[in-house]
Amino acid sequence: MATTRVATYQKMYVWELPVRLFHWVNVLCMIALIATGLLIGSPQKIFDAAEPSQQYWFGTVRFTHFAAAYIFFFNYLFRIYWGIVGNKYARLKEFIPYTREKLADFWTVLKVDILQIQVRRDLAEGHNALAGFTYFIAFVIFLFQVATGFALYSSMSGSFIPRLFVWMVPLLGGDAWVRQWHHLSMWFFIVFALVHIYLVFYHDWVEGTASTSSMISGWKFRKPNEIKRDD
Amino acid sequence: MNNEVPSIWQSMKAKGYSRREFLFFCGVAVAAAGLKSSGLAQVVDAFEKKPRPPVVWLHFQECTCCSESFIRSSHPIVSDIIFDTLSLDYTETLQAASGFQAEKARDDAMKNNMGKYILLVEGSVPTGENGVYCMIGGKTSEQILKEAAEGAAAIVAWGSCASNGCIQAARPNPTNATPIHKLIDKPVIKVPGCPPIAEVMTAIVTHVLLFEQIPELDSQGRPKEFYSRRVHDTCYRRPFYDAGLFVESWDDDAARQGYCLYKMGCKGPNTYNACSVTKWNSNLSYPIQAGHGCIGCSEAGFWDAGPFYQHLGSFPGFGIESTADTIGTTAAAVAAGGVAVHAAASVIRKRKLVLEQRAEAAASEALYEEREAAAAGKKAEEEEGGEEQ
């Protein structure tokens, strides 16, 4: 009879608890920031008949936005720190495909998973090189969003953190433009989330490495070497 | 020439102002410069003794609305003093001299008061085509500005034109209208607005005259005293904003109730000015109080940050009506489409791979069961053997 491949998987602890925590805190912040951000950009007519003395809902929406922004920022800083002390899958250098090996992986993933010119490839253990690079770009845009957000409120604030980003205002040509770019980059998060969630499902379906649950449990699975069986 | 420069009090007296009027002026100056009332004696002393500072007021690419605003100051005595009593040695729109005499008056004023005069600049400087778009007496405005700036004790950029280029610097800026701080190395006090508020202008001039130093400026060179707060944050309609009560159209009930104009495109939330505090026309009103949103005239590039009646601005290069949301929604729709196409393609391309994995899993399950069965069999055999023994 023909040779049948037998699935044998190795269990690997890939995402440490701090990485998983960062991920879910980030998710919650992003949901809060996008929801409140959209409301701030386009407030809805909710309590039309009320007197202003009786309510403060728009103020609360803005407060939630600012509070979530602070958590988002510190969470981000924490992730950078963990990128220095964390395990090899969490390291910052994972995000930039600068080695020949990483670059090769980058192109392979592009060919196999995105363009689907090829059907199969060896699977990466942590992030694949393309995903890592996408997260790098996301990190840059996170920072841009933090900088523009704090810059928008820097002039009215005496606090240390917003004051750090005062220089963004003249750089982008005034508050109006800072607001514009801040609003536009929000859409990056929406598009990113859409594609990111889809790709997690896609990879789990095609590869069966438990990529979806890995962000909850930390475990991923890989085939160490294929065990063949002759019947 | 004019070596014996009289003090402000001396020149006021010569023009027939009474001592009472002089003291009133000093009081207004104290208030305008933001001093305590106990500073009055100091001001009186200074205005009695110090020679009045000469002022050179230049006009370039502008509409003279700054001058118009200035002469309508709610404390006319202040502007009177500035125009009548101060040595306003050169200003195109108001000087008596003309032609060569005017140019000579300016040159003399600058030469005789080297390092002492206050330079007020109204209008932007067109540097395109070697500056031909604005020339006075055969000189380009850039030349005039640079000559005048050299010996100036303080330089004030009147209005948005001189501060940020205003309308003539809007895209595509055909004359290359340039704000003055980009052309001279000295610190410039920017007093943006189209026009700036008269009281703000007089207060800043008073401050410079009084203290002989420039007021505290923010990171963009605007006096903090008047430009450190947003129109929005000091607006009397702000409580409606926090309560989420907005005007939805110009003639709805909310507009009559005086709700916040945020959704009507009011630029108050990103405009730094004193409009909602100092107001206009002798503290009478300001645009938002009159029911119209702020257009952000004191902000750099306000003309390109429109439309005026829309909260989110349009993005250059994407059409007049397209906002960040149009671009974002399109991007999200494209991404969603891409995801759908990719998912469909994956089902076709990766099906074999997935089926292979299912076969592998089935094989491993079978192997596992075989081993289990074998182990169970072995155990049973052992147990049987045990019983036999």
Image (spheres, rainbow, N blue to C red):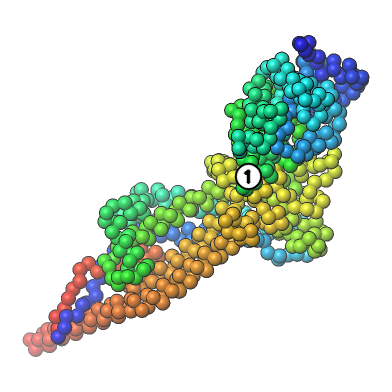
Which residue does the image show at 16% across and 83% down from the upper left?
A: A2
Residue A137, horizontal then vertical, whole percent = 43, 54
Residue B79 rendering spot, x and y as whole percentages: 83, 29
Residue at 67% in and 61% down: A43
Tally of numbered discs? 1
Other residues around mark 1 within 10 Å, as few (<14) / some (14–19) / many (≥20): some
Describe the element under mark 1 as helix, strand or loop: loop
Residue located 58% across and 59% down the image: B318
Q: Position of residue B315 (x, y in %)?
A: 59, 56
**Residue occupied by mark 1:** B173
- Where is residue A173? Give x, y as percent: 59, 45
Quadrant housing residue B9: top right
Residue at 26% in and 81% down: B359
A119 left or right of B191 in image? left
Task: List the single residue furthest toward the left.
Answer: B389
**B192 horizontally vs A193: left or right:** right
What amino acid type is highlighted by mark number 1? Asn
